[in-house]
Image (cartoon, rainbow, N blue to C red):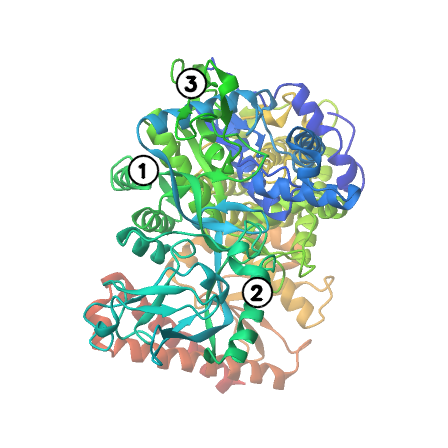
Amino acid sequence: MKKELETKYNHLPVEADKYENWNKKGLFRADVSSKKPPFCIVLPPPNVTGKLHLGHAWDGSLQDAIIRFKKLNGFDTLFIPGTDHAGIATQTKVEAMLKEATGKNRFDFGREAFLKEVWKWKEKYSQTIHEQWAKMGLSLDYSMENFTLNPQVNELVKFVFVEMYEKGLIYRGKRIVNWDPVQKSAISNIEVIYRETVGKMYHFKYQLVGSDEVLEIATTRPETMFADQCVVVNPKDERYTKYIGKTVINPVNQHQIPVIADDYVEMDFGTGVMKCTPAHDLNDFEIGVRHNLAKPICLNEDGTVNAMGGEIYQGLDRFDARELIIQNAIKANTLIKIEEITHQVGYSERTNAIVEPYLSNQWFVKMDYFSQQVLALQNSDEAINFFPSRFNQTLKQWMENSFDWTISRQLWWGHQIPAWYNKNDPSKIHVGMNAPVDAENWSQDEDVLDTWFSSGLWPFATLLWTKETPGEWFERYYPTNVLVTGYDIIFFWVARMIFQGQHFTKQKPFNDVLIHGLVRDEFGNKMSKSLGNGIDPMDVIEQYGVDSLRFFLLTNSTPGFDIKYSEEKIRHAWNFMNKLWNASRYVLINLDEHFKVNDQLIFSKHHENTIDLWILTELTKTMNNVKTLIDKYEFGLAGKEIYDFVWSKYCSWYIEFAKVNLNASNPEIVDQTKQVLFYVLKNILIMLHPYAPFITEEIYQYLNLKDSIMNEEWIIQSFDYNTDYINVMINLITVIREFRNTNNIKNAIPLNFYLNNLNQEHQKLFEQYLNVMNQSLKVFVNAQIHLEKINDSNISSISIEEYFLEIQTKQFINQDDLIQGLKDKMQELQQEIKRSEAMLNNQNFIAKASVEKVDAEKAKYANYQEQLASIKNKLKNM
């Protein structure tokens, strides 16, 4: 054996250098020619906008735990890393950085120079992300690493765009889009966050030409009134039919506009009259199409009023223009009233700007076709499995109500749209992988594609798929096995990967989707810079170690739910690592340099030591339970199983018993104990490795087995011995220790306990194992138990399960305290008897409950009666 572990556990040296060694040895590398079953996870590519946060740490820990678990279970694992260019988010950060540093915007730099600056940013933060992946211990195969703007991905993106365009699934059109005036770009529906916002409803007078009559029209956006094209009423509304065909005066610019009729107007909503601004409202746009209305735009891309506002309003920000419109309307007596309202307002997910419905030439994906594909898949036997399953319904509901996807963005950082316009005839469009032959006569569309367009191809893009030659990586590892992601991007990313994967590969992109929530602060608030409650995972790792952070994140994971950050729980995780360290140190100290593994001693049918059989049986149960739970992604429940086994059964009990057995006179017991200590420790390290890879590797290196724990195997040997009496003995030791502590009885004083009220099962167990148990009780608590009943009225009774442990107490316990304790127990039993009687007299319970449940309740009732009678008898004698 190697030299012993350091006296104290220190996570800093334990976690140093291991990641580099794993990587250098190729332990993260997949083997495309392996005979092992394949298992693949594609890491959701983090944005190159900055450092990874605690959510990334949780997400990465879950995936890495799955990969390490599968590798231990005999799979050829592939964990693919990558990063996302994150169009809007990255461009915004770089623009802000350059503005602060140079005072220039991107237009001052020009496209080419600006993009050079973005690439510098990308390289800087990619390096940071790599360092953080290493700190987290993510077993990524870097030979397969990718970036969403790599040339290979760009070629795939162009191919996908062209193919979808040629099939009529992508089109270009002038339509109302969600416009972000800060980014000056269109965004998709799901990039708009709707919030209840306090606002105002403004009621204006639209005066009929040649008359004193006015129509009252309300709007929340007066700044768009410059582009009004008509006033609309319902053709069946008798109040207004006489006005149809007449004209009214727009109060903000005095333009005369017609009154028209359309069924869209609800007669019982508001005044029953609405203004129609086709370029600034989706419903108004549809009315404009039906009635062939002009569609002028009165706002600039940055949200300021354009020339349609005239000298007074041109150049004003939309909200400043709104205030001035109201002031002038009050002066002109064209404002009727202002109402305070609370309504849903759309905000840009990236910039938090209020989104403007805006008429713009954009590129769109037709969603009807893809929605039907996804719904058909999820209603079939081949459906992707969601954990928890309720998120499958979330996906289906979104697909049933999807809108065409706006995929063009007015940005420079991203995949430039592979479309060219003829300089001499702009109506001519060329869509292709490359520019037309006479390229000098064509100009490429300056817009780029939505980031999620390229991210949606990620599962097969990372496996190097092309239509002509899918390739060996794709053939072996696709569909990937599981996607791990947050519930907040099911619409953004998961849905798009499903339908793009289905369409191009004719297969689903993954078999399972494990959904997790958010890491919130200790009070349940979302972590954010504005609240100042964010936690840098690297700071936590420095203080407590990555194993402690991972163990906290994983053992608090329940699929689909958020978790609260808790430094106290991370300290407890560190304490658990320390407990394992100290237990391992004890084991290694007791294994001399000549120790050799001898499984024959462990698996011997003539095993002498029943405590060994107990721990081996408990190990079998634990490893089986943990494997079953991890296969269902229940890391929280699996972690609890590991924790309980290691802390309580192995460290607190088995090692305590082993200390006695290592000093036994029988050398076979000594040898067996050493072998079992070693064997169970090895399997604890294997079980714990997915949760805490660094400390398990460190301790494993002292066992002189394989070159790395990553090459170990999760083998569950079938130990299934009847060791019930060990658990009974542990109970006895525990309660006798508590009895001594409560009554301040020194350990030097021997205690004799008598058993009372045993049922047949326990009677048989104690008769069979009494001598063995007494040997251990004498060593651990200086006590003995006796089967005969005690004939003394001055006794103390301890209730264990359904039997009593009794002891003469006159020399160390106050008679009054004893009587009061028995009375308290009697009162407790009387309550239980009353509850049990009520249940057994309840005909509804008798009729509906199973026979086993009714019988169990009857047995409890009889047991309570026996205990009560016994206590009454004791009190009578006392």
Return the residue at label 1: 370
For the residues labelled 2 and 3, the Cα–Cα distance comes to 52 Å
Picture coordinates of residue 707 (x, y %)? Answer: 65, 21
Q: Which of marks 2 and 3 is in front?
A: 2
Q: Which of marks 1 and 2 is nearer the N terminus?
A: 2
Up/down of 168 relative to 332, above or below: above
Which residue type carries mark 1? Phe
Q: Is mark 2 on a helix, strand or loop?
A: helix
Q: Residue furthest front?
A: 210
When asked about the image quadrant of residue 365, the answer is top left
Q: Earlier in the sequence, mark 1 or mark 3?
A: 1
Q: Can residue 554 be seen in this view?
A: yes
Return the residue at label 2: 321
**10 Å crowding of disc 1: few (<14), some (14-19), many (20+):** many
**10 Å crowding of disc 2: few (<14), some (14-19), many (20+):** many
Which residue type carries mark 3? Thr
Q: Nearer the viewer, mark 1 or mark 2?
A: 2
* Along the line of sight, the residue nearer the viewer: 601 or 196: 196
Q: Is mark 1 on a helix, strand or loop?
A: helix
Picture coordinates of residue 394 (x, y %)? Answer: 36, 51
Q: In which quarter of the image is the C terminus?
A: bottom right
Q: Any mark on residue 466, and which? A: 3
Up/down of 314 relative to 739, above or below: above
